Amino acid sequence: MHPLRKKRLTIILFLLAGVGVAVGLTTYALRQNINLFYDPSQIAAGEAPANVRIRAGGMVEQGSVVRAQQDLTVHFRVTDFASSVPVQYTGILPDLFAEGQGVVAVGRLNTEGTFVAEQVLAKHDENYMPPEVSDALKKAGVDNPYTESTVTQ
């Protein structure tokens, strides 16, 4: 093989190896940081992985909010009106958090089936419903029974 061709082939192989390593590392980093959304029916059916960071959303079940006396821990249930999931959150809840309102929680499902939230996101006004929550409710075939109107996006 001609020395010039051998040098070009070596450079091309190093470039391909470098691009391969870069793509592999990028894919690994993105896979570690992805937050998939699961509705309460999927979580109750066991489709959500345990101890993996996910997003869970639905409506805060009426009468389910229990605040601890000693600290900022709050227990509540999130429902899509077909199934519900217990959620535990320690921290200050958003001002618009209320029973019968849509929420999306970011956290991990523990082995007991409780969703331990790191962050709770609430709607920003009375007409807004998070798209994931709205889609989950529509998939369950129900409108929000806590309001007079139908679920909107």
Image (spheres, rainbow, N blue to C red):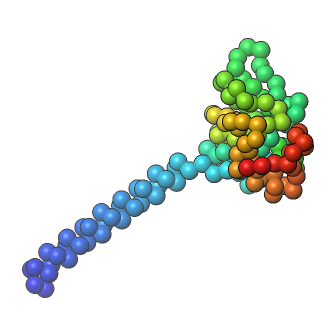
Indicate the quadrant containing the N terminus: top left, top right, bottom left or bottom right. bottom left
Q: Image height check: is 35 above or below 95?
A: below
Residue most toward the top? Answer: 70
Q: Image height check: is 74 above or below 131?
A: above
Q: Image height check: is 127 above or below 131?
A: above
Residue that appears at 74% across and 30% down? 97
**Residue 126 picture quarter:** top right
Residue that appears at 63% across and 51% down? 36
Residue that appears at 82% across and 25% down? 66
- Side of 150 where 18 appears, left or right: left
Along the line of sight, the residue nearer the viewer: 130 or 18: 130
The answer to whether residue 56 shows anywhere in this view is no
Q: Where does the image place residue 122, in percent across and percent down from the top left? A: 70, 35
Residue most toward the left? Answer: 3
**Residue 85 picture quarter:** top right
- Side of 91 where 151 appears, left or right: right
Q: Where does the image place residue 131, in percent across and percent down from the top left? A: 70, 50
In this rendering, the count of numbered labels is: 0
Along the line of sight, the residue nearer the viewer: 148 or 76: 148
- Side of 112 where 33 appears, left or right: left
Q: Where does the image place residue 68, in percent across and percent down from the top left? A: 77, 19
Q: Where does the image place residue 146, in percent across and percent down from the top left? A: 88, 39
Residue that appears at 78% across and 49% down? 152
The answer to whether residue 65 shows anywhere in this view is yes
